[in-house]
Image (cartoon, grey):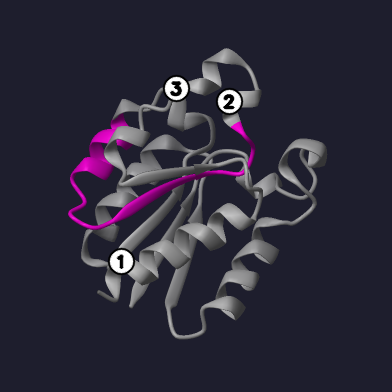
């Protein structure tokens, strides 16, 4: 089973950027934790601060089993990323580390959500774990 994890702008700063909102774990620590928790799953991750690079990577992910995407702020306005995700005929789960509904009003809407099978928000780094666990369960049926 091959699951890809895609992270958008500023997620390379996890662990140092507003830890009271995003937690103390770095992106590398989160990914390592996922690899430890799901040793039988081939997990690959990619992070970029550039919308077009993320769209290109989504196109490459069409051949894999499932996708976890944390679009960061792009989730609120990137129709290009949403369209790219719609073109991926695989299960996809959107993750947000913070609870977007307890934050600024512009964060309450995600244009990417409609292109995914589900959204997990507000569980911190555990949101990634939940997304991978759900994909593993659904792909194993």
State yes or no: residue 121 in magenta: no
Residue 39, compared with residue 111, is above or below; it is below
Label 1 Cα crowd, 10 Å radius (few <14 / some 14-19 / many 20+): few
Question: Which residue is tagged 2?
Answer: 101
Q: Residue at x 21, y 51 (%)?
A: 88
- Any mark on residue 91, and which? none
Residue 92, compared with residue 135, is above or below; it is above
Question: Which residue is tagged 3?
Answer: 109
Can you say which quadrant of the picture contains the N terminus? bottom left
Secondary structure at badge 1 equals helix
On the image, the x and y values in percent for residue 36 come to 61, 80
- Is label 2 in contact with label 1 (beta carbons under 8 Å)? no
On the image, the x and y values in percent for residue 11 come to 62, 45
Question: Which residue is tagged 1?
Answer: 138
Quarter where residue 10 is shown: top right
Q: Residue at x 33, y 43 (%)?
A: 55
Label 2 Cα crowd, 10 Å radius (few <14 / some 14-19 / many 20+): few
Please indicate whether residue 45 sits to the left or right of residue 58 in the image: right
């Amino acid at each position: 089973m091959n699951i890809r994890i895609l992270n958008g702008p500023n997620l390379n700063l996890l662990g140092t950027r507003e830890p009271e909102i995003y937690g103390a774990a770095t992106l590398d620590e989160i990914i390592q934790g996922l690899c430890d928790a799901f040793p039988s799953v081939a997990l690959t991750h990619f992070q970029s601060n550039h919308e077009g690079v993320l769209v290109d990577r989504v196109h490459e992910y069409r051949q894999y089993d499932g996708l976890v995407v944390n679009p960061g702020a792009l989730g609120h306005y990137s129709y290009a990323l949403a369209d790219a995700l719609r073109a991926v005929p695989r299960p996809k789960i959107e993750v947000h580390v913070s609870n977007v509904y307890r934050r600024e009003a512009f964060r309450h809407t995600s244009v990417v959500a409609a292109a995914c099978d589900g959204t997990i928000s507000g569980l911190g780094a555990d949101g990634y774990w939940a997304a991978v666990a759900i994909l593993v369960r659904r792909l194993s049926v």
